[in-house]
Image (spheres, rainbow, N blue to C red):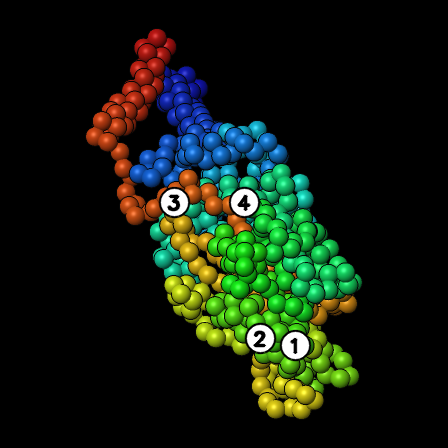
Amino acid sequence: MNRNSFLNSRKFKYGSAATAFTIAFIAIVVIFNIIFSALARKYMWYIDMTEEQVYTLSEEAKEIMSDVSEDVYIYFASEPDELMNGQNSSYTRYIYTTALQLQDEFPNVHVDAISVLKNPSFFREFYQTTASDIDTTNVIVTSGSEVRNFAATAFFTFNDVTDPSTVWAYSGEKRMISGIMQVTQTEKPIVSFTAEHGEALNTQDALTLMQLFDENGFTVNTINLSQDAVDDDCRIMVIYDPEYDFIGAEAEDQSRNEVEKVDKFLDRYGCLMVFGDPAHVDKLTNLNEFLEEWGISFVGDTMIRDTEHAMSVDSYSIIAEYQKDTLGASIYSDLNALATPPKSIIRKAAPIDILWEQGGGLNGSRDVSPVLKSYDTAELVKDGLVYEKGSYNLVTISRESRIVSNEYYYSYVIAAGSPSFAAKDYLDSNAYANDDILSAAMKAVGRERVLAVLELKPFDKSDITVTTAEANRWTVAMTTVIPAVIALCGLVVITRRKHS
């Protein structure tokens, strides 16, 4: 058989047609898969077969979001493929899916996934402090000038927060909408500075601190606790350098009990910041007794001096030592990550005693931690005489934990041993980290809206849960539809052969 006769033979024609059809069919399947996968990712063509509907936006979430009219932007720091199938996709897939569902449901929600490794400059405006870092798993929620930066782990609930393997529930829907509510609230959160106790609120230092709150998105006001009620939108209350005590149980009219109003404010997951002065704190009997209930005690008429770690000739403007692996240190974790972090300065500070570290208070739910300490070369000075040497607490934080709808919520008391920690000279200078630490604290302890209606979605069962009827329908589909398609293709081939 010569070459021409073979090329004209029925065997070659049928074989070529079959080969061409096979190649074309495979190409069509591949192209269809690529197109369908892209459309499925864009339009969320997924079937959620998990028992807790982990991948499905709840009706409660939709109802809450229906009240949000402002444009909201959700940025992921990795590209879509990395979020869905990458190294950390066991976390990010859930979060990204929730964000896309919000975007699909609400036209004012916009989602974008941009690699922070390829385009780091895009995320620069979202840094919360000058030392902030945004990882590939971070999620940014922003609206207008308000920004919230979340780590991926913030969208999950763990039995042990230090062990990622103990994750037991997805709380991303709640966390995401909580972040959206924070950045879109029509009124700014309020910080109230107490008045009528000799507070130095008209000084340049106090006004600079107020300006810092304003720059961080707070509305600043003053409050006379003996007469005024605390605003429901107040997140932080500041007691700045008081000279006179707060009215307590001795008030003839309990509506003028200032200490009780502070206590009730903290019960609403508020934060109290106290900037004490060594010359005045001993006179504040009621306030000190209240702070002791939170595990904090100022040492009055005493100042800390450090001849080896100071920024002034008299050695009272001391350099604070940053802490590691504590509640207080978590406020400025970005600074700790730097090889050479900028200095934090505090001048003429009173030492603060920590009365307990964990499990204090009436219910055993209050923990206390140093935020900043002096170096162990510091010494205590009283009446001009040195009587002790060691490391002392300069700034402390006390936290009360409560569980609401299976999630933790907190109240905070932050105490600084001197108003100078918020001094204008330190806040205005880029050489010091006082501004960064206070700004980070403002956002870290700001009270979140409790979205109790949104429930956690446990991972107790990893099996796909379907009813018997659903299983039968899927079985029929898989065993009949696909073979039918193949049979149809075969029928086409046979028909063409018979008529060729």
**First along the sequence among labels 1 and 4:** 4
Task: Report the front residue among 485 and 366.
Answer: 366
Of the numbered discs in the image, which one, if any, rests on residue 456? 3
Instruction: Give the secondary structure at mark 4.
Output: helix
Instruction: Give the secondary structure at mark 1.
Output: loop
Nearer mark to the viewer, of 2 and 4: 2
Q: Amino acid at mark 3?
A: Leu
Of the numbered discs in the image, which one, if any, rests on residue 179? 4
Task: Report the front residue among 394 and 228.
Answer: 228
Q: Amino acid at mark 1?
A: Pro
- Does the CB distance between marks 1 and 4 fall below 8 Å? no
- Whole-number angstrom distance, CA of label 2 to CA of label 4: 36 Å
Q: Quadrant of residue 386?
A: bottom right
| Residue 51 locus on image (x, y percent) | 31, 38
**First along the sequence among labels 2 and 4:** 4
Task: Evaluate whether residue 23 shows in this view.
Answer: no
Instruction: Give the secondary structure at mark 2.
Output: strand
Q: Amino acid at mark 4?
A: Gly
- Whole-number angstrom distance, CA of label 1 to CA of label 2: 8 Å
| Residue 96 locus on image (x, y percent) | 49, 41
- Whole-number angstrom distance, CA of label 3 to CA of label 4: 16 Å
Of the numbered discs in the image, which one, if any, rests on residue 298? 2
Question: Label 1, on which residue?
Answer: 278
- Does the CB distance between marks 1 and 2 fall below 8 Å? yes
- Whole-number angstrom distance, CA of label 1 to CA of label 4: 39 Å
Q: Is residue 493 above or below residue 283?
A: above
Disc 4 packing (10 Å; few <14; some 14–19; many ≥20) = many
Which image quarter is the C terminus in?
top left
